[in-house]
Amino acid sequence: MNEAEFRTLRELSSESEISQRDLSKRIGLSLGSVNFILKELIKKGYVKAQRFKNSNNKAAYIYVLTPKGINERVRQTQYFLRIKMEEYEKLQREIDDLKQENACLDKNAAGMDGKKPAVFIDRDGTIMVDVGYPKYARQVSLIPGAVRALRELKRRGFLIIIISNQSGIGRGYMTRQQADNVHKRVISLLGNSGVEIDDAYYCPHAPDQGCNCRKPSPEMLFDASKKFDIDLSRSFMIGDRDVDIETGKNAGCGTLCLRSAEGRAAGSLMADHESGDWDGLVRYILDSAPPEETDAF
């Protein structure tokens, strides 16, 4: 029995006194197809048909399921339920496997003292294209490869935290609200691509304001470390400038620079690793995992 015949049986079992026209609407087939199916069902012994009493309409019939038709509907329904149950059980097993995998990652990603590693990331020139002092959300454009890389780092158990100097606020180039709008746009683009940022820290001060948070001060990393119980020795700072590398070194983190060796100016600070693309940075981080954490990565 095909699907169209079974759908017809199902409708007839719920209401036998139904016209062919209404039946065609319910099962989504043309009137001619419905008439053909009904004839086949009658011929196969699944259905009996008799005229409506006191009806002059030659097409007006009562279609009654025969015992054979009832058994077929039961069999098809059982088959449908069995298939759906198998699909449900398969999905449930996959969900259980994912839960176990995530639990294992969470357990292994944390060190012996329960602390987790993080990847601290500069924003302009590292996550988004550097446009100077961005004050409009429309200026945000993500750097190619960043989304895929951050998604993988998140999957491997790293916290992802943005660390950024936004001196344009202190210099008067933009308002705090404009800076927030740009920040929200960055977070939104990443979130829509499956990357959830755990937190973001910004220094709004100009260089001459004498704050304690402006990079290369590690203050923002220290604040994040206290909040999330981060192991800085197993964490990394990624940026595109010397100030980012210096910040990571001051915090005791591994340091990575998003620039090729050829792109490094003479006398610039040397990071633990430099790469012209995000793939190279991620490979270095994952390869740097201690042997006892191999299972986690």
Image (tube, rainbow, N blue to C red):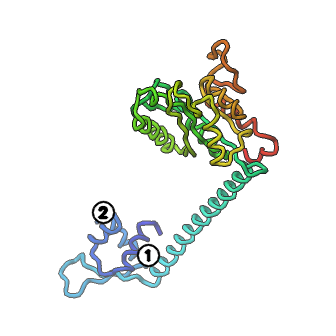
Q: Quadrant of residue 214?
A: top right
Closer mark to the observer between disc 2 and disc 1: 2
Query: What residue is pinned by disc 1?
Result: 44
> Who's the residue at 19% across and 87% down the image?
54
Q: Is residue 35 visible?
A: no
**Helix, strand or loop at mark 1:** helix
Which quadrant holds the C terminus?
Answer: top right
Image location (x, y in percent) of residue 230: 68, 45
State which tag comes first along the sequence, 2 or 1: 2
Which of the numbered marks, if any, corresponds to residue 245? none
Which of the numbered marks, if any, corresponds to residue 30? 2
Q: Is residue 197 visible?
A: yes
Distance of mark 2 from mark 1, alpha carbons? 21 Å
> Who's the residue at 73% across and 40% down the image?
234
For badge 2, the amino acid type reads: Ser
Q: Are marks 2 and 1 in contact (CB under 8 Å)?
A: no
Image location (x, y in percent) of residue 195: 55, 43
- Does 114 appear above or below 249? below
- Does 140 appear above or below 47? above
> Who's the residue at 70% across and 47% down the image?
116
In the picture, measured across the screen, residue 245 lies left or right of residue 199, that is: right
**Helix, strand or loop at mark 2:** loop
Image location (x, y in percent) of residue 12: 36, 77
Disc 2 residue crowd, few under 14, some 14–19, many 20+, Cα 10 Å: some
For badge 1, the amino acid type reads: Lys
- Does 245 appear above or below 76? above
Furthest residue toward top: 266
